[in-house]
Amino acid sequence: MCDFFVLIARAATALSKKSFTNARVSRIERAIVTAAHRPDADAPDAGKGQRVMIIGGDGYCGWATALHLSKRGYAVSIVDNLCRRQMDDQLGFNSLSPIKGIHERVRRWKEVSGCDIDLFVGDVCDYEFLGAAFKKFQPTACVHFGEQRSAPYSMMDRTRAVFTQTNNVMGTINVLYAIKEFAPECHCIKLGTMGEYGTPNIDIEEGYITITHNGRTDTLPYPKQGGSFYHLSKCHDSANMLFCTKAWNLRTTDLNQGVVYGLSTDETDMHPDLVNRLDYDAVFGTALNRFCIQAAVGHPMTVYGKGGQTRGFLNIKDTVRCIQIACDNPAPYGEMKIYNQFTEQFSVNELAEMITEAGKKIGLNPEVISVPNPRTEMEEHYYNAKNSKLQDLGLEPINMRGEFLEELLKQIVTYKDRVDQRLILPGVNWKESSSVAEVMAK
Ligand code: NAD
Ligand code: USQ
């Protein structure tokens, strides 16, 4: 608390001097807000009074978030239909880390932390089930991670394209109706994606852009150009959410998240049975996690095409903090806040270079190959996305450079016997998306 008042005093002194610039003012304002968030964010009662429903709480981001909030005194429930585990089974994939079933996970968490997590196993597309979960748990915030989240999965075939959009768009509409009907004060925090914006040749703003056209000016949703049926499902979600927010006076936040990397959070490290999932296959594995696993098992890192594709990235430890910040700063009624949730941006080639450097330091010999790009995307492009809003609210980003990558590689090496190298090479081609459902594992 002391630091907080010192910062306020320093900021007030600085503000009283006449010769400050706008940039300095915004830094000072940021310091005040940062300090305001920081003092008790990690206290065991930080979430006092908040009841957070985590939809998709058995997944990569959702599991880590559920534990993070539960440890800090938020009452947490998980809603999940476990369809992600079924997709792995159908396609013959496995998480690199040996994950336990959701019931066992929740029981172990209670044993290790003393905290209860309520569990609702069911589908958000089943409105009767969702309504019952809302009535029973009475959330003050609902964090919606529960969607089919792989771009390649959505491009495998027509069946999976339709499933992705039906599951994601219908699920989100149901969540919005459930809030309206059963918990109108509940803050809806929805995971969108940076990929909704595509790769325009101008700066990417945080959600809205002010445009002057033929002498008139308006602030409008930033143009969307999703690059797969999955990314497009998120664009549709965002439009539906904005409409419902205004029509029903809801409080909503859309988090356009970048690619998440890493395995550990403080809570998932508390017991081996709490370990998070880590995907490395060509459908659910994301670029950095895949490259690290490839480097650890001596498989060349699979850069698609020229490797100039640039994206926003963030550590899973920052994902959980961003969600806590969103919970603590609800949108006003009738307004949809939009944050770009990533901390650093890199090209695919830069990722491969950083992992090569880190791998060499721990005795690996990482190699890189360029494979024909299975996706339809720009391989060299301008990319400059804004991401200051979450930092203004107190996020202190973790950098990818430095010791983090070495630690992640060492962690992965301990699981290397679980890697099935057949799952690494890309198997889904955007142009060849077929009309018939395919079986992946070779
Ligand atoms: P994940 O696949 O690990 O987890 C998603 C969870 O949602 C799974 O446990 C799945 O069973 C559940 N689910 C899906 N459909 C459901 C339904 N109809 N009803 C109930 N549960 C359902 O995915 P993740 O990596 O944790 O991603 C979570 C969210 O964050 C997704 O919406 C994704 O689009 C978004 N996101 C993820 C990343 C990333 O890099 N992982 C980046 C940006 C945005
Ligand atoms: N890529 C490679 N080699 C690989 C895998 C990927 O070069 O082996 C490239 C892809 O072509 C792409 C970039 O890396 O240009 C990112 O691909 P990715 O698979 O890491 O990420 P993406 O398909 O965009 O999807 C992931 C998550 C998704 C989330 C998205 C955030 O699966 O849920 O929405 O990251 S974003 O990319 O910002 O839209």
Image (cartoon, grey):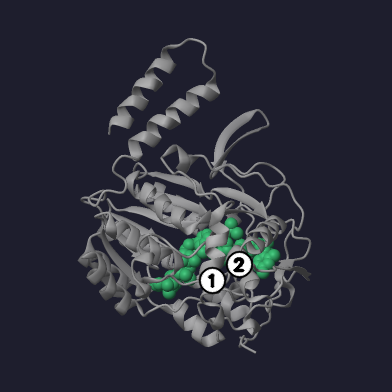
Closer to the chain start, of discs 2 and 1, is 2
Q: Are marks 2 and 1 in contact (CB under 8 Å)?
A: yes
Outermost residue, top side: 18
Q: Which amino acid type corresponds to the residue marked 1 in the rendered image? A: Ile
Q: Quadrant of the N terminus?
A: top left
Q: Amino acid at mark 2?
A: Cys
Identify which residue is drawn at 56% across, 34% down. Answer: 218
Q: Is residue 210 above or below residue 28?
A: below
Query: Residue 349, position in %: x, y?
Result: 72, 58
Q: Residue at x 65, y 89 (%)?
A: 442
Q: Secondary structure at mark 1?
A: helix
| Residue found 61% across the figure and 69% down from its top | 290
From the image, tell me which residue sits under label 2: 292
What numbered label is drawn on residue 412?
1
On screen, residue 137 above or below 204: below
Picture quadrant where residue 305 is located:
bottom right
Mark 2 and mark 1: Cα distance apart in space: 8 Å
Q: Residues within 10 Å of mark 2 (few under 14, many from 20)?
A: many
Using residue 194 as the reference point, say whether residue 42 is left or right of it.
Answer: left
Residue 347 lies, in percent from the top left, at: 69, 54
- The answer to whether residue 233 is visible is no
